[in-house]
Image (spheres, coloured by chain):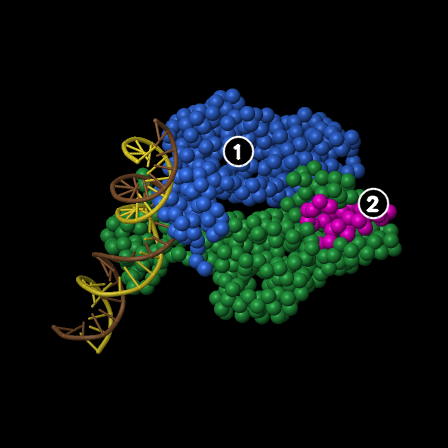
Chain colours: A blue, B green, C yellow, D brown
Amino acid sequence: MSRVTAQDVAKEAGVSLATVDRVLNNRKGVRDATIQRVTTAMDRLNFVRDQAAANLARRRSYKFTFIVPAGETAFFSDIRAEIETAMLSAMKDRIDINMVAVPPLDPRAIVDAIEQLGDDIGNGLALVAVESQIVRDAIDKLRQRGVRVVSFISDIPNSRRERFVGIDNVAAGRVAASLLKRFIAPRSGDVAVVAGSGTLRDHVERRMGFEQVMRAECSNLNVLPWIEGEELAGIVEEKLSHLLAKNNDIVGLYSLGGGTRGVIDAIESASQDLSVVTSEVSEHTRAALISGTVDAVLVQDSSHEVRSAIRVLKALADDGPINEKQERIRIEVFVRDNLP
Amino acid sequence: MSRVTAQDVAKEAGVSLATVDRVLNNRKGVRDATIQRVTTAMDRLNFVRDQAAANLARRRSYKFTFIVPAGETAFFSDIRAEIETAMLSAMKDRIDINMVAVPPLDPRAIVDAIEQLGDDIGNGLALVAVESQIVRDAIDKLRQRGVRVVSFISDIPNSRRERFVGIDNVAAGRVAASLLKRFIAPRSGDVAVVAGSGTLRDHVERRMGFEQVMRAECSNLNVLPWIEGEELAGIVEEKLSHLLAKNNDIVGLYSLGGGTRGVIDAIESASQDLSVVTSEVSEHTRAALISGTVDAVLVQDSSHEVRSAIRVLKALADDGPINEKQERIRIEVFVRDNLP
DNA sequence: GCAAAAATGATTGACGTACATCATTATATA
DNA sequence: TATATAATGATGTACGTCAATCATTTTTGC
């Protein structure tokens, strides 16, 4: 019981191999009736075209670019490391990956990088987007040139990016709220939120989800205006320390972006007893979970995200199918007791 | 900049293609010095063997068998559906999958299935194990015949299975405890545990993790002996209802296995106000999360597990590398606010 | 019914690697 | 040094598909 080949299909359909090939690659010059005959033969025999052989013959190869922030945050240096790793294993499938790190939170830097790359960008681009019209325009232009584009980690809707690869950030915010409200109970008071920047869609969406739940379900809790820390631990610590010093009603905190180290430092030197949910695992959050400073950490699997982006870009380039279940990026919850 | 082929490596190393081939597939008959020359040439040129071409030439195909419980639980019917789906996409990679469903909780049934399959079992087996010596023996015998074996969902250590594909069940139990303790706080009292069977390693391990945390961190909570429901909703409901009727101190419940529908029914008709963590998403747990009967659900991604098992079996069959990060199955936490 | 056009058959050479065979050369052993 | 042995080269076929060419058959329009 060896594999069914195009040859077998030809025999079954009573046509030549050449005709099967024409149907398979929808080339012109085949009558509808014949196409019918061939396709029914195909699924009668349960034929599946051998991708390996096809790619080999096509001598098709792929080149994808990742544009990611050069920021110092644990999360993004992790992402960059994962991309480096993925480069190697992707080569086996004739996928060539290059990565460009750009200054964070700067739409202009992204656009410049795209322009500078020119055709070197290859068949597809995955970029950590920053909400901005010039970025949208740059994406549109790429798509016109036939480059496939996905947004990565942080989305940019209303652009012509074809997909978003990343977690459901609204859901992440909702989970954070849902957990935090239970951790805080039965106390009541203010809840602080620390984010990176309002231009990052993922941060905005997490905040949105967080507020939805807090508003709807927690009449005893009051969400304070968020603190923007630009993903820099120093700034985060300063602003948060200041807030904690002057407001004694704070009972909970949600850190939804980078600069978590600053959050931890600020909390540990403050007097309040807070329930805390953060985002990112690093050595600092690990320690904070164990010591009890932080109650839960919401994590996105960066390794999975990178692989997913590559698979999706390849599928787009091939006009092939996308396995939705496989590409759904999960949100993982870590508490002290299940640290990896 | 076209791809580097084995031909290029041969030229670079000053040897023939045949010798490169010998090195590449570590065949005998090459001097150490020559091997050195070839390998350094390889990474000087950054050579990566083309998987597509290799597989094609090898005309290697794989046949794997899944042995899973035929049980009625939402989780296992989900698993079975995922296996069916995976069959199709696996064919593209010349992987042929067959599935055998056996009566649940019955070691004899597993052994019989293995014997009945004989050589039809193929190159590899993934089985949802039940702890039992006869199952261990059967696995050992398979391994002697060269069949690669992984345990799936529920592990069987001390056998010669080569890997376990599934979540870290101890960690799952710990998370459950960690969340439940916070949900229960500041109340105190008894905590009930509902499981499927003591012969299922995954259930035993979850229970273990759950108790570890409860014992260590919750002096105010008392974990009751577990209820074995054999993964049948009816039995679960009866036993749990009985327990809830006679014990009024119960403040929390962890359902770590199948039969969750019975758990939900029992709780809803009971008088206590419980904090509840369960395992499995189904229409029932969805509804229960929304209505507030259940506080959190710990889920393993069945789709990922099936794909992972297939990838691992293939890697074992090829004596190839396993991407640990990719094969780590995550535990997902669902609360009311992030239901998919 | 005939010419033009469309559809199909037949055939061939890639693609990059695996694998086998036989010939040749270098190295070790006696 | 002769001989056995190990190492390497040279070569060819196969894998399943793609892509192109040319020959042949069938259909279409008039």
For the magenta stretch, what is the residue range?
Answer: B257-285
| Image point (75%, 58%), residue name | B229
Image coords of residue A151 (percent x, y)? 51, 32
- What amino acid is at disc 2? Asp
Quadrant occupied by the N terminus of chain B: top left
The mark closer to the camera, 1 or 2, is 1
A19 or B147, which lies in front? A19
Q: For residue A114, say whether it is visible.
A: no
* Marked residue chain, label 2: B
Quarter residue A317 falls in: top left
Quadrant occupied by the C terminus of chain B: top right
| Image point (36%, 47%), residue name | A16
- Is-magenta flag for residue B272? yes
- Above-or-below relation of C8 to A73: below
- Label 1 sits on a secondary structure element that is strand
Crowd rating for badge 2 (residues with CA inside 10 Å; few <14, some 14–19, many 20+): few
Image coords of residue A106 (percent x, y)? 50, 25
Residue that carries the numbered disc 1 in the rendered image: A163
Q: Is residue A227 left or right of residue B58?
A: right
Residue that carries the numbered disc 2 in the rendered image: B273
Q: For residue B109, say whether it is visible.
A: yes
- Label 2 sits on a secondary structure element that is loop
- What amino acid is at disc 1? Arg
| Image point (64%, 66%), residue name | B109
